[in-house]
Image (cartoon, coloured by chain):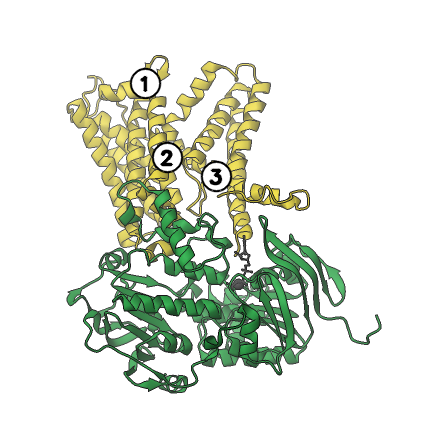
Chain colours: A green, B yellow
Amino acid sequence: MATADAPPLLELTGISKSFGGVAALRDVDFTLRAGEIHGLVGENGAGKSTLMKIIAGVHSDFDGRMAIDGSEVRFRSARDALAAGIGMVHQELSIVPDLSVAENVYLGHQPVNRAGLIDWPAMMEGARAQLKSLGIDVDPGERIGSLPIGLQQLIELARVLFSGARIVILDEPTSALSPPEVQILFEVLRRLRASGRGIIFISHFLDDILSISDTVTIFRNGRRVVTHATQGIDKGWVIERMIGGGHEELEESYVGAISLHSRPDAPVVLSARGLTLGRAFADVSLDVRAGEVLGIYGFMGCGQLELARALFGKVHASSGTLAIGGETRRLANTTDAKRRGIAFVPESRRAMLFHHEPVFKNVSIAVLDRISRLFVRPAEERAIAKGHVDSLNIRPGSVDIPLGSLSGGNQQKVALAKWLTHPPKVLVLSEPTRGMDVGAKDDVVQIVRALRDRGMGVVVVSTEPETVLSLADRILVMKKGRIVREFASETISKDRLLEAA
Amino acid sequence: MTSPATESGSARRPSAMGRVLRNQMRNIAPFATLIVLLVFFAVASPSFASLDNASNILTQISVTGIIAVGLTFVILCAEIDLSVAAIANATGILVAYLTLQESYVNIPNVPLPGWAAILVSLIACAALGVVNAFGVTRIGIPSFIMTLAMMQIGAGICALLVRGQIAYAVPDLVTTLGSGSIGGVPWLVIVLAVFLLAGHLVLTYTRFGRYVFMVGGNREAAEYSGVNVKLIIGSVMVISAVCSGVAGMLGVAHFGSAQQNEFDSYLLDAIAAVVVGGTSLFGGRGGIGNTIVGLCVLGVLNNGLDHIQIDSFLKILIRGLILLAALVINVYAQRLREETAAG
Ligand SMILES: Nc1ncnc2c1ncn2[C@@H]1O[C@H](COP(=O)(O)OP(=O)(O)OP(=O)(O)O)[C@@H](O)[C@H]1O
Ligand SMILES: [Mg+2]
């Protein structure tokens, strides 16, 4: 070779990968240099995660070549890749919920003392220090499954960031984080970059991609469309290459003022008075009105996730009352809530979906009690599921493939679909657009608006200001478990919203 | 699951076939084991491969099989029931306790008409199941611990009822079903077939069965979908107890006596049958079909080892090793699935 340049840290050439005859990647070239943050964007199902899983040794069966520091490698397992210095944070959390925070941070490489036993004090201390540098203050001995999902995500990040990997892959790492944590994460990434590591960063937040990465690669339908230096490109340029032209409206990032159209005269379908639950939230009162989208915005950990669960009977408030359609009720459990016309989509796909089951069973589970008394009716289930798959544009369009083979964003759509067959009176959505590409986010906005216009009361809980701003007719801001501010029938901007939180 | 991999140029992609195999591992492995055992014993012992012996094997697995049907429901929900053998024993003793015994049997029992004895026994075993269900779902005791306690309670009931004695008589209906036969086919085998069929139909075609699989597959997701998870788990504990109770009554008739500790080996056998058959210990995967294969493996193994004159102490060890191998395959199959379906 004539160039004086060192070979790139990671070089992929002619990568193709198909799942049972369906191509997920076609002839993709990809290069990552040391000291580079490489942003990866593309629609849901474009093949981003698949490429990353190839790099991280999860998929060992593919066509094409992969080289690290110029020498060809072929990983047979994720362990091989780890040994070669590749660390990946998967889109789906892969923490072990029943282990402690510290054990999760050190998963797979626990420090051992001279006797060969796990060195618990060192592990606790190390975990505490590492998390601290990410700005997280948790007890390393705590069971990780009992923490909010955003924290879990940060802890999983910590595991990979501090594992000493030379190539760090982050597949949508910020989806559960609120702005301050994203900034902390970016700080850490810049430090890693300065130390000469290569970082691949996947996100549907184009603003984030443009602000942190040095290079951007755009994927579409399993092909690499273009790779370009981040300098000199903007959001519109990216969107056009991601999903084609004519989507100018998607570019607006809600920096300008938005006017809210609340409906103070509409009947109240669900109301809470003085709801309190331990340390999670206190004295929350709110009204959900028919035909109105109520947004609840707050930073991660402000109690909004628990509040949403309390509205669905998943957790029980220790004091306060809930009234459904004017009638005061205590929701015994989720079945009770569902029967009373309340539906809920949690923020975590893992908590909502059945990975190994086919798509149609994932959709029909919520309506089985309506379409069957004693015996299941698979044909009808398939038909219902097919209807949603088509109307929500879920790809691939088959309802018989296992849910786990859909891309992350498409899984999220399935989670929404299951409640749409018999529209509930109140639909509570926690992070409804997490993990969705710009086009799909827009789809969700359209769906939610349509449901609202049919008279449904919708609650949207999110840590993403864009989500709340794009959907809500009225916004409540939560801070440390309390509602601190209400925006209704006025104009509001992202800045004002962030300020209030 | 459909297998879309076959038509897509398997010459270029030899692992496409491999992927299907990996996914179906939990179904293929037990079946292969069964075939290997059958061939082995048929070759090793001339007396093994006969129609008479086949009927023997079926009778031998019947009591275990009826217990295993209920246990399949429990394990599919990712729970466990360690009290099956104790409940079987207690119910078997109870039905004898409620039957008029010969004068030489020295038990202060309470004779009832046959139908009443059977009815009371069925209610009793269901009640024990309800206690299990209550402990697991309402109080929140892990099923492993709860049913361990129930195991002891069942043993206590047995001890109190027979006080170290042996009872013999059971109601006529139970005697017939447990030890009679019709047209050369033992009633016990017919009852097993009915239970297996009913279990299969419920799991495959009913809403309840679907919920069982979904709760086992992802309990949290089931709850978020509005499924009454506690009701489902409670129900499978009761189903398991009732299956055990029926197996206990028929078992007593089959053995010809009701006494303490009569069913002790059935706990391990029933769990082994379910797990060897490939029903996932993590819940959500498997079914009665798997349990049938598991029962056959166990039955063929137990019976075959008797045919090839082998040290009876070694026999115990061999059974243990086979069970271990099945557990390894079970857990390994789960991991393979997780890797292939990682999405
Ligand atoms: N394990 C699998 N089995 C079968 N098909 C799969 C599997 N994993 C991914 N696919 C398919 O491959 C394609 C690419 O999926 P991939 O997960 O890489 O998309 P993505 O770009 O990460 O999307 P998202 O932004 O939604 O996460 C999709 O069509 C998906 O359905
Ligand atoms: Mg992805």
The residue carrying mark 1 is: B179
Farthest residue, direction top: B183
Helix, strand or loop status at disc 2 = helix
Farthest residue, direction right: A2
Q: Quadrant of residue B108?
A: top left
The residue carrying mark 2 is: B200
Helix, strand or loop status at disc 1 = helix
Q: In this view of the protein, which residue sits in the foreground, A410 or A58?
A: A410
Residue A141 visible in the displayed image:
no
Q: Of callouts 2 and 1, which one flags the residue occurring earlier in the amino acid sequence?
A: 1
Circle 3 Cα neighbour tier, 10 Å, few/some/many (<14 / 14–19 / ≥20) = many
Query: Residue B41: x percent and y percent?
Result: 56, 22
Circle 1 Cα neighbour tier, 10 Å, few/some/many (<14 / 14–19 / ≥20) = some
Q: Which mark is residue B278?
A: 3
Question: Where A107 falls versus B115 (above or below)?
Answer: below
Q: Which mark is residue B279?
A: none
Ligand 1 placement by image quarter: bottom right
